[in-house]
Amino acid sequence: MAITADRALQLLTRVMDPEIPALSIVDLGMVDSIKVDESGVHVDLIPTFMGCPALDVIRQRVQDALEDAPAVVRFVHTKPWTTQMVSARGRAALTQWGIAPPTDSPAGVRCPLCGSPNTRRTSAFGSGLCRASFYCHDCAQPFEQMKSI
Ligand SMILES: [Zn+2]
């Protein structure tokens, strides 16, 4: 078996979030550690929001992505996942997908469609618990934001 931890991490950049197919679990900040020993690849993942995305689906996709290497995928709870762990590339992918990235900025949430800050939150819950619904006054479109936690 010739896989290295670096190679495994590279393969995991192809594992996309089941709900947001533009966003990899690496950019989501879920990968806590990757270790390789004689028994295989050990991947520790930090679960994101409760129930979203689907953890069983992700576990299977990680195993598939690592190809022939025997993989042990664990979800660890040693530290909480927060939206601060979403990478810059992940935030760009969210915006392109039409979802406003999480922000703590006092300037508020910018519309992912037109970039306007002239938005209003219409519901604390969007299509999932992890999302909030917004409305953009400039392009008159509803959109969702990944909630900041
Ligand atoms: Zn807009």
Image (cartoon, rainbow, N blue to C red):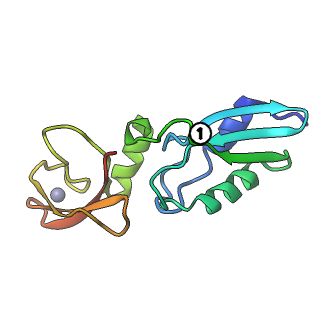
Residue at image x 26%, y 53%? Answer: 112
Q: Name the side, left or right, on which 89 lies relative to 42.
A: left
Name the spot of residue 12 as percent of width and height, x first: 65, 44
Q: Kindly identify the amino acid type of the residue bearing the numbered disc 1.
A: Val
Residue sitting at x 50%, y 39%: 29
SS at mark 1 in the image: strand
Query: For the point 74% across and 31% down, which residue is it?
Result: 5
Q: Picture coordinates of residue 145 (x, y %)?
A: 29, 55
Left or right: residue 144 versus residue 25 is left
Q: Position of residue 52 (x, y in %)?
A: 48, 60
Figure quadrant of residue 131: bottom left
Mark 1 lies on residue: 31
Q: Is residue 60 above or below residue 89?
A: below
> Would you call the spot at circle 1 few (<14 residues within 10 Å), some (14-19), or many (20 or more)?
many
Q: Give the quadrant of the N terminus.
A: top right
- Residue 17 vs 72, above or below: the answer is below
